[in-house]
Image (cartoon, rainbow, N blue to C red):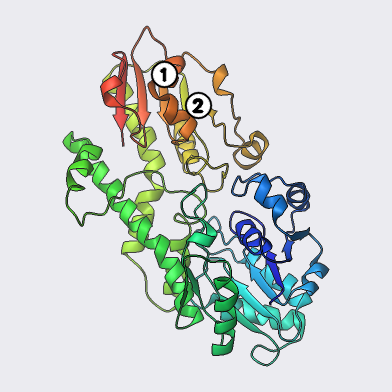
Amino acid sequence: MRKISVIGLGYVGLPVAVAFGARQKVVGFDINKSRVKLLSEGVDVTGEVDEYNLRKARINFTSDPNGLRDADFHIVCVPTPVNASNEPDLFPLISASQTVGSQLKKGDVVVYESTVYPGATEEECVPVLEQHSGLKLGRDFTVGYSPERINPGDENHKFTSIRKVVSGSDEKTLNIVKEVYASVIKAGVFCAKSIKVAEAAKVIENTQRDINIALMNELSLIFSRLGIDSRDVLDASETKWNFLPFKPGLVGGHCIGVDPYYLTHKARLVGYTPEVILSGRRINDSMGEYIAQSMLKVLVKNKMQRNDLRIVILGMTFKENVPDLRNSKVYDIVKSLDSMGLSAVIADPYADKTEMKNIYGLDNTDINEINMADVVIFAVAHSSFVDQGWNLIGRLIKPSRPCLVMDIKSVLDRERKPKNVILWRL
């Protein structure tokens, strides 16, 4: 049986470590010492693993790289973000490779789960492993790639219930990687033809979703000008058996809104400038500004512009029912409002107040302290918001005069709309 270490204990790495830790001892490594301390105490602030399963798993949580010496099968699950220019930021990946390389032994296998462009594992990571270990790929150690498919907040698609793609630098390594993952993955394992194929398969999964959502967003822009509710159109279209049920919306987070840039970066390096992918990215990245501009147009049309306009935004995390604030496109709405000289009060029960302040410089207000709003932007469909529906909105708005409610996710029942509410849907 292989001795496993997991490097990076975030949304991806922790479920991996817990799954393996349920059947054997695992080394769980993270450079964030406070994160390691909390996990050791049975606390996962991401909410992906409950306390019972976290405590039950046999994981040695550590920030000491020397602990990796106890393992011979290393799984790297660190973030792969983009920089301000939307170019791949490989610093966490390279840093993790340096850490693993410094502890690498003959016979070890290193498997990467982080989303990258095709070729990154062998072209970027392997040289770092060799440099910091003094070992040689193929002779002393081998590598594999098995793309993560974690969907934060999704109770139906967990690490062990999602079919796993695996690959290896040679046939023997592929079989080892397959066997290790098959020991915990209930949904089965698929062997990719090469590491590059596995890398490419991962990056296009989210690119495909990004482009489809971009199409829905563009259709929403068109239908708005035609005076048609886009959700009514989609409800009608979805009656056809092969119509894909994508919806318009904000596309943020650390996957769909980021991964396509890894592919376009590599495409440019080989002499091709993508058109469809980048066009979809431009549309999705513009939706925050579009929502803010639409708000202003509705206010002008209904003569609701006032110097004391009170705007409330419900939700700040990048998606519903998760505390993750990274790359939240709700912030694009806030920035656009700010450029208009408008400010908003933000309430999100899932977001950590300190983290929200540190990342965006914004306050997270207790929703029970908010009332008398002229505009409510229902940005993130947290279940606690959706369950309360119009009752929640009723407590926030001014009952005596017209109020604008912008239902970004179309979760509010139009038939129950209060008479004084002007409802806008994306």
- Name which quarter of the figure residue 373 lies in: top left
Q: Residue type at mark 2?
A: Ser
Considering the image in quadrants, where does the N terminus appear?
bottom right
Q: Residues within 10 Å of mark 1 (few under 14, many from 20)?
A: few
SS state under label 2: loop
Residue 415 visible to an observer of this rendering: yes
Instruction: Tell which of 328 and 285 is nearer to you.
Output: 328
Per the rendering, the mark at residue 343 is 2
Dot 2 or dot 1, earlier in sequence? 2
Residue 353 x %, y %: 64, 34
Residue at point 30%, 25% (across, down): 423
Residue 119 x %, y %: 51, 78
Which residue extends farthest top?
400
Per the rendering, the mark at residue 155 is none
Considering the image in quadrants, where does the C terminus appear?
top left
Q: Residue type at mark 1?
A: Asn
